[in-house]
Image (cartoon, rainbow, N blue to C red):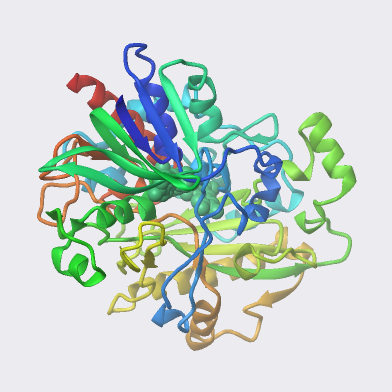
């Protein structure tokens, strides 16, 4: 028996495992379904998409998306120590202070600022990329020429403008949340980490959660928590575990063949994600893009000195834009990558080129995570329902972004490096033509949130202290509790949530 059982060693789980075991009198068991994070490619920043569809990726696909030509969009999620922070693009962009406005009491920007500071001061350092591709500076200059503001710090109190992206790296290598928090904590005798442990169901006794049943190798084990079970399985894994345990909308659970233990209608609902649509252009001869990063020479340089193109996190610069003057904060992001990012990152680029992706920061479309079956080892259905908002707001923002990306591409100095637009192609000028591109090729930016939303209303899953409403000794702490998508990326906000959760849990004792 441990004091705390944590399910999922992702961004949030690693933070909690570390913070809770700072007290030597507290014992913690951390269960992770995936393997350890020893795969050497995890360390190589430019190789992050080569981790796709390997043993450290859940390799999901969405349900067919009716507004995206019925496509089942590839949906990677980390499945190893560090979770998604071990396969992500390492961009550290927390969003805008107004993102906290829709969060419950205790979570205002003024209140969470110190958790951002506490993480950045030690285990979650923000680094400058070491060796950016020269085209990235050209992108920033061209964006300024196209009318965007230059912004040196994209994590400041204002974010509008264009700038270089800070990264989760040390000496040119990925520095995941497992590196920052878990590595040191694992030396403590009061922390036990078990990999290959797939949580199947929570164990309930009346309204108290006693622990979790998990699969390890061929056998089923029970982990008992004296104080609390903390679910950190991510925005897909956490609602799935609750639903499999009978915690969720009673009608839907019955239809999936699961006995309801606690009727909680919001579990799995309210899924929001960042949709991205890329514009790809070929570069003129003689320009070295990251398409050539993979060579013995660059590998040697990276191994010996932690320098060179393999240190690139690919997404080297970003811009935050308000598509309408009356907005208080950006609703559109552009990301620049000095490489063609094609086919959802599943193919290696064969030609030199660049990508400018438009990202819909504040989608109105809302989807859900639901059970495929009662089988505790089956992956759930992820259905973001991209671009499903009835008034077409979401598509309009992305169209705005594609046109802006094109205007930047046509400005010097970047224009001087560009041979031709490859996708959607220069002849795609009308809204209809750009819409076809959106439907055929948009992809996730991998930021699902909201499926175990915090709040005090009927559809809230956890209360503002992240305790599952109506049950005892159980919390959810990860990206699933976000009440809204940040106007930025989700890793640092997840770390912030877990840092504050650690204080809430410690204060209770
Ligand atoms: C490819 C990719 C690129 C990204 N790029 C960026 C970026 O550049 N910047 C940024 O800010 N964000 C990025 N993100 C998003 C960011 O990494 C995530 O939002 C963040 O890591 C979420 O943390 P989490 O703790 O909620 O979940 P995760 O980190 O996903 O952790 C969940 C953990 O729980 C485990 N788990 C799930 N189910 C079970 C179970 N039943 N039993 C046991 N364990 C289980 C999983 O294996 C995983 O380790 C990216 C994500 C991906 C996938």
User: Could you tell me residue 251's position as x and y percent?
Assistant: 15, 69
114 versus 478 height, above or below: above
User: Could you tell me residue 54's position as x and y percent?
Assistant: 62, 55
| Image-quadrant location for residue 104 | top left
User: Could you tell me residue 224's position as x and y percent?
Assistant: 28, 32
| Image-quadrant location for residue 310 | top right
- Left or right: 204 as drawn, with respect to 420: left
Asked whether 464 or 360 is in front, the reply is 464
Quarter occupied by the C terminus: top left
277 versus 14 height, above or below: below
- Left or right: 416 as drawn, with respect to 245: right
Q: Is residue 93 visible to us here?
A: no
User: Could you tell me residue 388's position as x and y percent?
Assistant: 33, 76
Kindly identify the residue that appears in the image at 19 percent across and 58 percent down: 248
In the rendered image, the residue lying farthest to the front is 219
- Left or right: 493 as drawn, with respect to 476: right
Quarter occupied by the N terminus: top left
């Amino acid at each position: 028996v441990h004091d705390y059982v944590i399910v999922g060693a992702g961004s949030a789980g690693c933070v909690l495992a570390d913070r809770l075991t700072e007290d030597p009198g507290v014992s913690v068991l951390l269960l992770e379904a995936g393997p350890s994070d020893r795969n050497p490619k995890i360390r190589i920043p430019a190789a992050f998409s080569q981790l796709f569809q390997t043993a450290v990726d859940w390799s999901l696909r969405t349900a067919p998306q009716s507004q995206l030509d019925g496509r089942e969009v590839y949906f990677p999620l980390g499945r190893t120590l560090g979770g998604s922070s071990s396969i992500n693009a390492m961009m550290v962009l927390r969003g805008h202070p107004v993102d906290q406005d829709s969060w419950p009491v205790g979570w205002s920007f003024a209140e969470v600022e110190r958790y951002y500071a506490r993480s950045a001061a030690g285990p979650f350092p923000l680094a400058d990329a070491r060796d950016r591709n020269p085209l990235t500076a050209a992108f920033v200059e061209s964006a300024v020429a196209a009318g965007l503001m230059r912004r040196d710090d994209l994590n400041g109190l204002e974010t509008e403008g264009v700038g270089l992206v800070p990264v989760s790296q040390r000496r040119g290598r990925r520095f995941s949340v497992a590196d920052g928090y878990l590595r040191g904590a694992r030396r403590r005798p009061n922390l036990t980490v078990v990999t290959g442990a797939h949580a199947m169901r929570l164990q309930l006794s009346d309204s108290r959660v006693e622990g979790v049943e998990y699969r390890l190798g061929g056998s089923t084990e029970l982990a008992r928590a004296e104080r609390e079970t903390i679910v950190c399985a991510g925005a897909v894994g956490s609602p799935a575990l609750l639903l499999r345990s009978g915690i969720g909308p009673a009608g839907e659970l019955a239809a999936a063949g699961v006995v309801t233990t606690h009727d909680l209608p919001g579990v799995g609902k309210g899924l929001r994600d960042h949709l991205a649509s890329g514009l790809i252009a070929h570069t003129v001869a003689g320009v070295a893009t990251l398409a050539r990063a993979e060579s013995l020479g660059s590998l040697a340089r990276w191994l010996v000195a932690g320098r060179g193109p393999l240190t690139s996190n690919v997404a080297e610069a970003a811009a935050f834009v308000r598509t309408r003057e009356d907005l208080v904060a950006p609703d559109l992001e552009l990301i620049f990558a000095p490489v063609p990012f094609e086919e959802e990152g599943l193919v290696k680029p064969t030609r030199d080129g660049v990508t400018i992706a438009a990202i819909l920061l504040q989608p109105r479309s809302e989807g859900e995570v639901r059970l495929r079956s009662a089988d505790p080892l089956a992956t759930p259905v992820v259905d973001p329902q991209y671009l499903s908002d009835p008034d077409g707001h979401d598509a309009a923002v992305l169209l705005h972004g594609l046109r802006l990306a094109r205007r930047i591409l046509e400005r010097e100095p970047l224009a001087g490096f560009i041979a031709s637009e490859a996708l959607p192609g220069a002849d795609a000028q009308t809204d209809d033509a750009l819409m076809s591109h959106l439907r055929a090729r948009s992809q996730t930016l991998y930021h699902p949130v909201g499926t175990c939303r915090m709040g005090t209303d009927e559809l809230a899953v956890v209360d503002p202290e992240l305790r599952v409403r109506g049950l005892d000794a159980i919390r959810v702490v990860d990206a699933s509790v976000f009440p809204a998508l940040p106007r930025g990326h989700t890793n640092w906000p997840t770390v912030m949530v877990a840092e504050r959760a650690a204080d809430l849990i410690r204060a209770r004792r």
